[in-house]
Amino acid sequence: MHENHAAEAEADAVLAEKYRVLQKLILARHKQNSRYYHNGKLAVAVGFAVLSVLLALLGAATGRPITPLIIWIALLFLIVFVFVILERRMHVMDTKVVPFLTDDAQTTLDLYDPWEDDGEEEETEEEEEP
């Protein structure tokens, strides 16, 4: 019985060390990726502003502003789509995962699952017969 307990304690120590290594790795990568993300947002904003000016000049020079406008709108929607997804990812990491990893007392990761049942069951309306 004593050998079994010692083996479990050793296994727990190995798992704790693996957790610490993964925790440090995830936090370091998140910090690095956050810098890349914020620099990327700035670069895309500046690039889009420059492209907007170039497309406006192209439309004015050719006298046909519809094609540059269509390109501008398509790029705008693409950029917004990509950054909405990335912003959601950063929000979840900053508000849920990083606090979970840094607080050793927290034992559950409280991520919101939009597909999970909230416990509210839809009541079906059944007509009562008199």
Image (spheres, grey):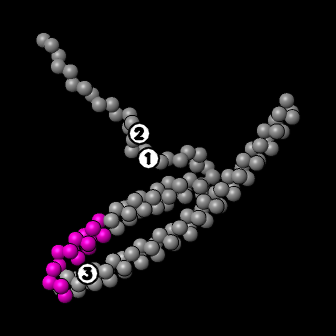
Q: Is residue 106 magenta?
A: no
Q: Which residue is mark 1?
A: 112
Q: Is residue 44 left or right of residue 111?
A: left
> Toward the viewer: 36 or 15?
36
Residue 25 figure quarter:
bottom right
Kindly identify the residue that appears in the image at 53 percent across and 47 percent down. Answer: 109
Q: What amino acid type should be assigned to the residue bearing mark 3?
A: Leu
Contact, CB < 8 Å: mark 1 with mark 2? yes
**Which span of residues is magenta-colored?**
61-77
Q: Earlier in the sequence, mark 2 or mark 3?
A: 3
Does the magenta stretch mainly form a helix, a strand or a loop? helix
Measured as percent of width and height from the top left, residue 15 is found at: 72, 47
Q: Quadrant of the C terminus?
A: top left
Q: Residue furthest top?
A: 130
> Toward the viewer: 106 or 64?
64
Kindly identify the residue that appears in the image at 65 percent across and 56 percent down. Answer: 22
Q: Which is more foreground, mark 2 or mark 3? A: 3
Kindly identify the residue that appears in the image at 29 percent across and 65 percent down. Answer: 77
Give residue 55's mark: 3
Q: Which residue is mark 2?
A: 116
